[in-house]
Image: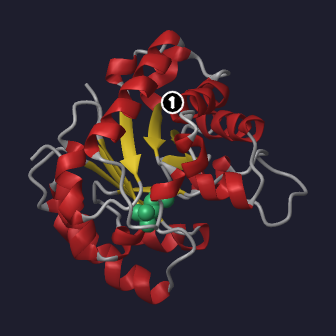
Amino acid sequence: MRRQIVAANWKLNGSSELVQSLVPRVREMAASLDNAVEVVIMPPSLYVGAVKGLLQGSQVAVGAQNVARWQAGAYTGEVSADMAADLGCTFALVGHSERRELFGETDTMVAEKVSRALESGLDVMLCVGETLRQREFGEAKAVVCRQVERALAGVDPGRGEKVVVAYEPVWAIGTGKTATAEDAQAMHQAIREKLSQMGFAANEMSLLYGGSVKPDNAGALFAEPDIDGGLIGGASLQAEDFIAICQAVGS
Ligand SMILES: O=C(CO)COP(=O)(O)O
């Protein structure tokens, strides 16, 4: 059974005040959702404990936006997958394009982080996506499939249920430009084929779309057969918008 998931990536946004005002509203509205969507909040790691505390007894999950390549040691400023799991996270976002571009994360580092997250019992939300230039050169599918292959090369294909892939075209993130539902579907299909070639039970795996998802475009994206939910940046900071996007799954 393919999971339907909508995840909030707060990125470097938030405060104690935002946690206190937003999380209870998401919790309340998630409880009244009439679909089976899994809702995940991924705040900056310093707020994970506070967010988790406000979600006790709720089905809304918490995730880490990033984990270290190491589980412990002299790595100042890092947060490990073990620590995220210890604080009640059930997901780790790995390989976001902002991490790849701004923090120099290579496919090798992404693969190491995938391994650490799985070792810690977390579900991995692996982000992949092409730049505008790569798309214009007709390389989008090759780039994305290579990212999938390299990130998951060390993962036992029998563990596919622990892996979610989020396709986020770099040119659509925070720009207001969304991939058309048809283009996104075509890429999701290519990702599923790649996963299948790698030996994963690809039809059982959940593939999310991210990049300027808003309440007014979520329905069309989620109606596509290979798009199982979304990874939401800006719109996840507004309770109404985020919940409207959650409601668009399966509707
Ligand atoms: O990067 C994203 C989620 O991880 C998408 O961000 P936006 O929804 O702000 O475009």
In front of the other: 144 or 76: 144
191 in relation to 50, above or below: above
SS assignment at label 1: helix
Residue 40 placed where, x, y %?
Answer: 37, 55
Residue 173 placed where, x, y %?
Answer: 48, 60
Q: Splitting the image into four quadrants, where does ligand 1 fall?
A: bottom left
| Colouring scheme, one of rainbow, by chain, secondary structure, one colour | secondary structure
In front of the other: 131 or 161: 131
Position of residue 141 in the picture relative to residue 239 (left or right): right
Rendered residue at 40%/33% (across/down): 187
Amino acid bearing label 1: Lys
Task: Tell me where residue 119 sits by quadrant.
Answer: top right
Query: Is the residue marked by circle 1 packed among few (<14), some (14-19), or many (20+) residues within 10 Å?
Result: some
In front of the other: 176 or 11: 176
Residue 129 can be seen, yes or no: no
Task: Tell me where residue 177 sits by quadrant.
Answer: bottom left
Q: Which residue is mark 1?
A: 141
Residue 213 can be seen, yes or no: yes
Rendered residue at 49%/19% (across/down): 194
Question: How many marks on residues?
Answer: 1
Quarter of the image for the N terminus: give it: top left
15 in relation to 167, above or below: below
Rendered residue at 59%/42% (across/down): 134
Task: Tell me where residue 3 sits by quadrant.
Answer: top left
Position of residue 25 in the picture relative to residue 20 (left or right): left
